[in-house]
Image (cartoon, helix red, strand yellow):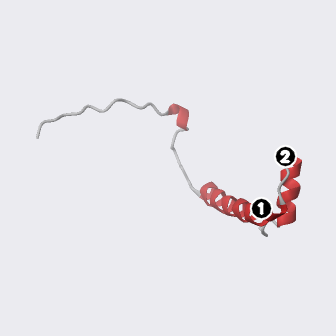
Amino acid sequence: MSGLTPYEAARWALRAGLVLPADRRTAVAATADHIHDVVAVLRELDFGETPPAPAYRATPEAHDAAV
């Protein structure tokens, strides 16, 4: 993937109804690229038979003070 340009960042922000000031465009584009890179790595992970989060049941831990 080629990086998001500052112009494209401003265009996507405007499409979402946000005005992106010119002095913020480069930083926003770099941040968006970083987020994209992290998500791309997460998508490559193999979770195998891991159930989805709603299937997880947190149970209270039994605290035993015995030594």
Q: Earlier in the sequence, mark 2 or mark 1?
A: 2
Instruction: Tell me the amino acid under the disc marked 2.
Output: Ala
Q: Residue furthest left?
A: 67
Question: Which quadrant of the view contains residue 33?
Answer: bottom right
In this rendering, the label closer to the viewer, 2 or 1? 1
Q: At x 30% / y 33%, what residue is drawn?
A: 61
Give the residue at mark 2: 16
Name the residue type under label 1: Arg
Residue 38 drawn at (x, y percent): 63, 60
SS state under label 1: helix
Q: Residue at the spot x=57%, y=56% of the render?
A: 45
Q: Residue at x 73, y 64 (%)?
A: 27
Using the image as rendered, state which of residue 22 and residue 9 is in the foreground.
22
| Spot occupied by residue 64 in the image (x, y as percentages of width and height) | 19, 34
User: What number is the disc on residue 46?
Assistant: none
Helix, strand or loop status at disc 2: loop
The location of residue 26, given as percent across then percent down, is 77, 66
Query: Looking at the picture, does residue 22 appear above or below residue 19?
Result: below
Q: Residues within 10 Å of mark 1 (few under 14, many from 20)?
A: few
Left/right of residue 14 with respect to residue 30 in the rendered view:
right
The residue that mark 1 highlights is: 24
| Residue located at (54% from left, 32% from top) | 54
Q: Is residue 54 left or right of residue 30?
A: left
Please state, as top left, top right, bottom left or bottom right, where the C terminus lies in the image: top left
Which picture quadrant has residue 46? bottom right
